[in-house]
Image: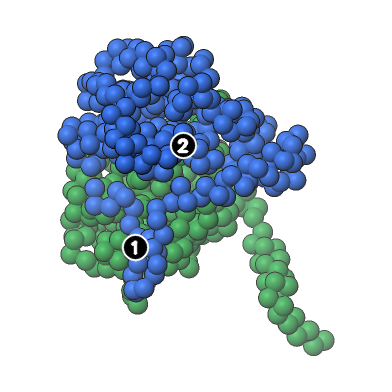
Chain colours: A green, B blue
Amino acid sequence: MRDIRVAMAQIAPRLGDVEANLETHLEIAGKARAAGCDLVVFPELSLTGYLLADQVPEVALQLDDPRLETLRHASLECDLLVGLVEDAPGHRFHNVAAYFSGGRLIHTHRKLHLPTYGLFQEGREFAAGDRVRHVQTRWGPAGVLVCEDLWHMPCAWLLAQQGAEVIFVLSNGPTRGARPGREITSNAVWRELLQTTAQFQTTWMVYVNRVGCEDGLTFGGGSLLVDPFGRVAHEAPALDEDFAVIEIKDEILRRARTVYPLLRDENIELVQRELERLRRLRYDLPRPADVEG
Amino acid sequence: MTPDGALDLDPRWTVEILQKFIRTELHRTGLRDLVLGLSGGIDSAVSVYLAARAIEPSRIHACLMPYRSSSEDSLSDARAIVDDLGLDAETIDISPMVDGFEQVSHDAGRHRLGNVMARARMTLVFDRSMHHRALVLGTSNKTELLLGYGTLHGDLASALNPIGDLYKTQVRTLAEYLGVPESVRVKPPSADLWPDQTDEADLGFSYAEVDRLLGLLIDARASRATAIEDGFAPDLVDRVTRTITRSQFKRRLPIIAKISMRTIGWDFRYPRDWMT
């Protein structure tokens, strides 16, 4: 990858108001461009807000929707990574992260893991994505995940194996817990998860979380840049809106991958064999026929 | 490691979150003012100290609503809070409202009359909310919500409740952090519906004990057996569990019989912040 400047847009989207959110996006993209950024990253569902419930079909967009033209146009000068609801073929509604660059939509990631437990109801609202693909950007290979995806280790692993050197995580993490010495507990938990993932995959991690309140939920902010050694390179404030410009350098990636050649030493053959075996056991599949001697 | 269900709280971050909650949720409705019933007790005190950090205190309208038999201390404590924060306040004696009720309903005992008082206060607070174009700030804590220790459509009624996810013990932690006057913090909690009433005598256990148990059963989702292993009397565990179950109706809107293809509460699902 080449060195890049990235703007992290820690915003509070307006619930259900795509037009108003589009305006905010363009305004912030202008700011990022003025700051010489290669890319601006928004949180999960940044065009729609989070607690959509029955509003999902109302805010869903087909990816060729003319309303996205302004974002495509803005990406001529500065790439944009935004969160939206996709009205996909067959009218399946996906929670999507969309990467715009050079006037085009070059990559989408459909959220794979839709939390449907505790306070979360996403499995009711959305169709789950079913693929993990990295994206070759103007500046280098990257991967995109949405929130809960990061809690499933294979997602980041698969992206790193495909060559991603930066992994973006767009998030809508609500605050939970405030224990003494543990700040906002959910923010601390995210930080640990991101640092660990960065260390395991030796990738840069860019985490952009939203802020603001919806009904009784307060979103935690605390967006993060973690380097491939697992060190926090930048942390946005908790709870408040923020706009930060960060630098991501290839030299640090190179050093981390020199010191910890984990990617080089990964044994995907081994993983493949063990997965095959697990799959056979789990679904009670027949053993492959013995090879005739 | 923190024990499961521990109730210790970081007051700074809790206050940050609650301030943000009050300000955002108020302003998104297009309103600028809050109204609440200020009893002189610790719960309404903490709610209003939080509110006074979130918005201009002069935009908070406190209703002090004593009844004939209410304790003098309650009123003077409430007045001290009004002065300390610089709130807009009015004092309304609810005795004539309750007397009016008694004229048409002679046989109400003290419990029913206590509910009538709570609903008289609710009537006034909601009336003032229209008058001031203000949202009603709630003052029910998590302990009383779980135990159903409140009057339905009375003190349980509000538009925004900043302390509904804080146990009584945690409300005390915040009270100290927020600088709530000591006289409010140290007196025994009471609904003050009749002379010398105290919550802990009504409930039959202390807040310190029941909060620890609730932290375990509710927050940490521990089993009955674990609670007993942790030293709670089986009788207490069963009684508290029964109390929570039986008061579920107080924590829900009325249930609606499903007839159509799309029913409010079942498949007509929008957050309250819909289109705000």
Residue A3 point in image, percent of width and height: 38, 41
Measured in 3D between alpha carbons, the distance from the residue under mark 1 to the one under mark 2, in whole angstroms, is 37 Å
Looking at the image, is mark 1 or mark 2 earlier in the sequence?
2
Residue A245 point in image, percent of width and height: 32, 35
Residue position for label 1: B264
Instruction: Identify residue type, mark 1.
Output: Ile
Q: Tell me which residue sits at (73%, 36%) in the image.
A: B232
Looking at the image, which is closer to me, A167 or A140? Answer: A167
Chain for numbered disc 1:
B
Residue A22 point in image, percent of width and height: 21, 51
Residue position for label 2: B109
Image label count: 2
From the viewer's perspective, tell me whether residue B32 is left or right of residue A2: left
Residue B1 point in image, percent of width and height: 68, 32
Instruction: Identify residue type, mark 2.
Output: Gly
Q: Is residue A36 above or below residue A270?
A: above
Q: Tell me which residue sits at (68%, 41%) in the image.
A: B237
Res B163 quadrant in image: top left
Res B79 quadrant in image: top left
Q: Tell me which residue sits at (22%, 33%) in the image.
A: B128
Looking at the image, which is closer to me, A188 or B167? Answer: B167
Chain for numbered disc 2:
B
Asked if badges 1 and 2 are on one and the same chain, I answer yes
Are the residues at dot 1 and dot 2 in contact (C-beta closer than 8 Å)?
no
> In what element is the residue under mark 2?
loop
Q: Quadrant of the C terminus of chain A?
A: bottom right
- Residue B120 seen: no
Q: Tell me which residue sits at (58%, 33%) in the image.
A: B203
For label 1, count other residues whose C-alpha is less than 10 Å away and answer few (under 14), some (14-19) or many (20+).
Answer: few
**Front disc: 1 or 2:** 2
Looking at the image, which is closer to me, A180 or A208? Answer: A180
